[in-house]
Amino acid sequence: AQSVTQLDSQVPVFEEAPVELRCNYSSSVSVYLFWYVQYPNQGLQLLLKYLSGSTLVKGINGFEAEFNKSQTSFHLRKPSVHISDTAEYFCAVSDRSSGTYKYIFGTGTRLKVLA
Amino acid sequence: EAGVAQSPRYKIIEKRQSVAFWCNPISGHATLYWYQQILGQGPKLLIQFQNNGVVDDSQLPKDRFSAERLKGVDSTLKIQPAKLEDSAVYLCASSLTYSGVVYNEQFFGPGTRLTVL
């Protein structure tokens, strides 16, 4: 069965500092990988996705993630964060073979950017 | 392009009462999902529709939850009767399906925050 682990429930970081949010997944089949962001009282918005090809994926708002198959990881990074990046970030995995493309979400990482 | 619409945005009910949530997906999106997001957790898929057919409802508590998408467009999720543990945000999402292929990006609505007292 698939699972997603986001080890850090909260990550405080100062403005303009770099940040990495960690995501590890468990799956016996090929997967698609996603990062979503959720601002307070809003739905989820796609940041970036890995479907195939280059393992370094660039997304919106200056975020990027690297797919590492051997370590089953898909960590999210940003070289310089802004106050507006304060939000909850969710990693998700989708089974490529299931046909239903069901998402399994991690428990989320709350990014708090400090002035 | 209009996004996924959900109503109501907030709902407070007593336990054992009934409640219904409505979702209108992005125009043309054949696949619709309902998720439950309990505080401090990631969203959990309750049910997935393709057009008006159910693709996956393996995690839907069928003794109290029901969902329908009669005309393959908007959808309603119902809880009857509600329990305290049903307090959560209920998210609706949709994705494009073309020639039978489900495209992977899911677009989410703002959610309905349910409080059961």
Image (spheres, helix red, strand yellow):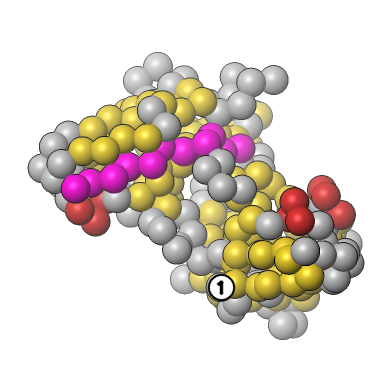
Drawn side of residue B54 relative to residue A22, left or right: left
Say which chain tag 1 marks: A
In the rendered image, the vertical position of residue A15 relative to residue B1, given as above or below:
below
Residue A111, percent from left and from top: 66, 65
Residue annotated with mark 1: A9
Q: Which residues are magenta?
A: B107-117
Residue A63 on the magenta segment: no
Q: Is residue A87 above or below residue B7?
A: below
**Residue B7 shown left or right of residue B86 in the figure:** right
Residue in view at x 55 percent, y 28 percent:
B4
Give the x, y percent position of residue B91: 46, 41
Secondary element type, mark 1: loop
Q: Which residue is the extreme one toward the top?
A: B71
**In percent of the image, x 59 and y 19: which residue is there?**
B27
Magenta portion: prevailing SS class: strand
Quadrant location of residue A18? bottom right
Q: Residue furthest bottom?
A: A71
Position in image of residue A8 (x %, y %): 60, 76
The image quadrant where one finds the N terminus of chain B is: top right
Q: Residue lying furthest left in this view?
A: B16
Horizontal side of B82 relative to B111 (left or right) equals left
Q: Amino acid at mark 1?
A: Ser
Residue B115 lies within the magenta run: yes
